[in-house]
Image (spheres, rainbow, N blue to C red):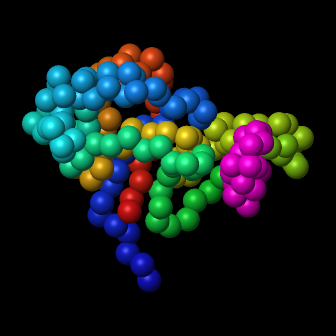
Amino acid sequence: MPHASHKLSLFLVPADPEWIPDAVTQERILELLSSKGAIDGELRGAGGANLFVEGGFYRFRFDRPEKPVMYGNRQGGYRVYCPVCGSNLAVEVGKVLKQWNEGGGRDFLCGSCAQNVPLEDWRFQPSARPGRFALVFSRVEGIVLRKEASAWLSTAAQMDFVPVWSRG
């Protein structure tokens, strides 16, 4: 039986799943992290890393996959529900991701309630979020994203982020 990894990462996924920051925005984010003493010149967590994630983190990076992905727990199962009627949609996740990757939308017509619901509004347990980009804090030491840090990052990026924790 596989064991859960002790390595925990925090993905901050843009509230708009289509959003990808330009180079200027990425530089503003790096400047913010550096000015707060959270990262060193090699993007490793530094003394101020605790200002962002309780206990700090090992490394920071930008994740920009070639195609949209689902950020979330990479170990163990998950449950997915329609936010309108609560129907189980776990089987549909792969279908909607494939549709999105092929240039289609992120919406899905729930067979139980006949509501068209975008993938980012589905209820995931544990939490997950679709996106084309994420800020990644690798090997975090705690599970608390500081409220001030969330506000600083949103201001620097001019975009709100949704936190997703992932093991593995």
Q: Is residue 108 left or right of residue 83?
A: right
Number of numbered tags placed on the structure image: 0
- On the image, the x and y values in percent for residue 98 come to 72, 54
**Residue at the extreme bottom:** 1
- Compared to residue 3, the image places residue 62 above or below, namely above
Residue 102 belongs to the span the image colors magenta: yes
Residue 133 visible here: yes
- On the image, the x and y values in percent for residue 88 come to 74, 55
Location of the C terminus (image quadrant): bottom left
Q: Which residue shows up at 88% across the image and 49% down it? A: 111
- Compared to residue 2, the image places residue 123 above or below, namely above
Q: Is residue 110 left or right of residue 163?
A: right
Q: Is residue 88 left or right of residue 110?
A: left
- On the image, the x and y values in percent for residue 55 come to 19, 43
Residue 121 appears in which quarter of the rendering?
A: top right
Q: Is residue 139 left or right of residue 1?
A: left
Q: Which one is in front, 77 or 58? A: 58
Location of the N terminus (image quadrant): bottom left
Residue 150 appears in which quarter of the rendering?
A: top left
Residue 9 belongs to the span the image colors magenta: no
- On the image, the x and y values in percent for residue 117 come to 77, 37
Q: Which residue shows up at 19% across the image and 28% down it? A: 34
The span picked out in magenta is 86-107
Q: Which residue shows up at 32% across the image and 35% down it? A: 145
Q: Which residue shows up at 47% across the image and 56% down it? A: 73
